[in-house]
Image (cartoon, helix red, strand yellow):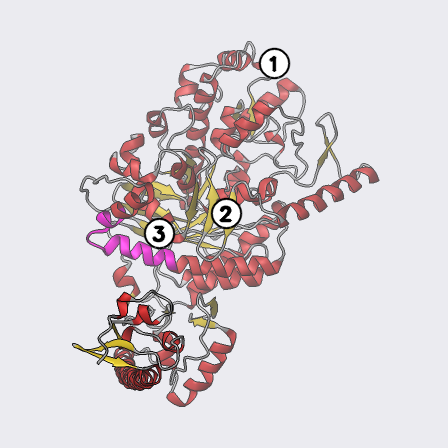
Amino acid sequence: MINKNPYSEKKNDISDKLNYKNINDVSIHELNCLKNNRAVYLKRGNMFFISSKEEALEKKKNYMIKLKLQIFFVYIILNILIVLVISKNVVYNEKKLKNKNCMLPNRRHKNDLLKRQVKNRKVILFNDHNIELINLKRKYNKRTKYKNLDAFITNLKVTHVVNHNKSIITYVKKKKLLFSNKIYNHFNYPGFDFSVLKENNNEQDKSRIGIIKTPRGDIETPNFLFCATKGCMKSTPIDFIKKCNTQVILSNTFHLLIQPKPHIIFQLGGLHKFMNWNSPILTDSGGYQIFSMSFGSVSNEIKRKCAGTPQITKMSIKNKKKDNLNNEEDQVNNNFINNNCENNMYNKKGKCLSNNNNSNNNNNNNNNSEKSVTDTNNLNKQIILKLNEKGAEYKSYYDGSIDLLSPESSIQSQYLLGSDFILVLDECTPYHVDKIYTEKSMHRSHRWYVRCLAEFYKSQNMKNYHEYLNDIYNKKYKTNDKWIKRDKNNQAIYGIIQGGIYPDLRLKSCDFVYNLPFFGLCIGGCLGKDKDMMYAVIKQTMDIIHDIKKKKEKNTYKEKPIHLLGIGQIKDIIYGVKQGIDTFDCVIPSRLARHGYFLSKIKTIETIEKKLKRKLQNEYIKIKLSIFQSDNQPLEEDCACYTCQHYSRAYLHHLYKINDNLLGTLLTIHNVYYMNHLMQDIRNSIKEGNINQIEQKYIKK
């Protein structure tokens, strides 16, 4: 026995630190630091013992060997349990697929197919007519080896759309089958219906008339949608729009996302109550506004504006700040009348010149086109910060805040707005983008469509969807608000056909979009650089749609309304109607009015031409003409609108001279009534079978 207390000595070595410690808490390194033949007091369990350096090291090593063996046996047992659970899930999923007649290839082909998929890091999205390739979000781990294809797919997030039995199957990582049911049983759109009353099948005339039934009223087709971009028709009370026999309007999701926010409108009762409009409303997804702002002036090509329209190059700092706060609807100059001069150029005085005037003009035109090509290669990073599979990350032009517009957030925003018709999120590419990027963008938009449908299904079938959105927006804006309980919004969703000016891409997009359970279809994307190319793209797209309809069986086929995005000139509308398009939208009627133009029939235009002693090129006239200074007649003699019934051309000319905002209001009322009257005449002419007479009445030749 050693009677000497070890704590009575000075701490001259490490043995003093190890005394009375548990041997399990002492590391081998600390024992190696002991002096040879140095005694130390250690503890094992409840007993203390004295040991030398050599004895302590031997006991410590024996303890570590036993600990490693225990860990090894536990690891083996856990691996066996994991393998058993995975194999059980695979058998369960195979039984589910077999019951739904959606079995994947035979087992002998699964390993080969698995190797090809893993090598390309892609998963197949099945469709009747085409195959979409979806890049996997997570890289394949080479250490993990799946025995068959079922286990591989079960551990990835994949969506299969099988059209021959109209089923949607969704797999989520490490989860069982979510749902596998009939498409049209879930997307039955209660309260909505579209029926065709009469349809022509001639090569030159495929026009049709029909009725779109909604919970808020019926819409006669063909029809025109007026743009209440920010929830209002600029400078015009909504009651005047109602009295002009307007059946449906359009609002912009992106601008309402900026101000006042969709969840604010939802708490105020929805967009209909917010703007005092009880008829149907269509809201777009917000994608076009983001991408048009990103590409800048190239967005004019999508709208088919004149490539040679003079641009304002010198602007004051104040005007630049104002332009950053205004939307693209306000960014228009007084040369709007020259929109139809796609192939013309302008001199410094603003006169329209022919392309064949001289070689200098041709060189300038080529330089401008080269600039536009380089401009499209670089996005405006001040608006759109990032574009990827998740969506578009943008910067608000109102307060500079950064937000993400994804397929899910777009559908959620449109649901909160409470519109009747909503659009899927898509990427709108300009004309000068090459085919490779156009195809890449089209496939990405198609993947976004599937995500939009999934979120739309959730919004229509999830019982506590309002509470779900309430939690999302509380976390987003760091609030603790509790929304008032409301009934669910009944909505119908439209898909958008992409593909640019390329017929093969349009064919793929038509096949994909038409076979998804959308209520209606939209023709979107770039339609070309001039009228001829635009008409060719529209005709090719509609021919593809008609061919798909012919191949469908009558029992499985259901008519879908077709909408043409961004078209509003009278000649374009009549051409679209002849191709079988049902609805149109554009800002032209209200924008013309705000800049002092009023729409007029050919009979009135010919009368004004005699007074002017010159020809007019368009179907709209500027009220500032000097011949109107003492003209006491209405804008049109046979027009029953509020403006023509109460005001003369001379008074409207006076309002223009004093630059009063009342002019924009009165001309907007006239133009809205004129367009509604035009669409009514088109519907009557289709019934009577004389649509060609409409061109003589409304189109300037």
Q: Secondary structure at mark 2?
A: helix
Q: Quadrant of the N terminus?
A: bottom left
Q: Which residues are magenta?
A: 451-469
Residue 293: in sight, yes or no?
Answer: yes
Q: Nearer the viewer, residue 123 or 364?
A: 123
Q: Is residue 615 magenta?
A: no
Q: Amino acid at mark 3?
A: Ile
Residue 214, percent from left and from top: 28, 45
- The answer to whether the residues at label 1 and label 3 have Cβ atoms under 8 Å apart is no
Which label belongs to residue 493? 3
Whole-angstrom CA distance, mark 1 to mark 3, is 49 Å
Residue 563, percent from left and from top: 43, 48
Please tell me which residue is depicted at 56% across the width and 36% down the height of the picture. 699
Q: Residues within 10 Å of mark 2 (few under 14, many from 20)?
A: many
Q: Quadrant of the C terminus?
A: top right
Q: Residues within 10 Å of mark 3 (few under 14, many from 20)?
A: many
Q: Vertically, is 478 above or below 508?
A: above
Q: Amino acid at mark 1?
A: Ser
Which label belongs to residue 626? 1
Residue 629, percent from left and from top: 56, 11
Q: Secondary structure at mark 3?
A: strand
Which label belongs to residue 236? none
Furthest residue in direction right, as rendered: 359
**For residue 130, side relative to residue 185 (left or right):** right
Residue 180: in sight, yes or no?
Answer: no
Q: Amino acid at mark 2?
A: Gly
Please tell me which residue is depicted at 70% across the width and 37% down the height of the picture. 344
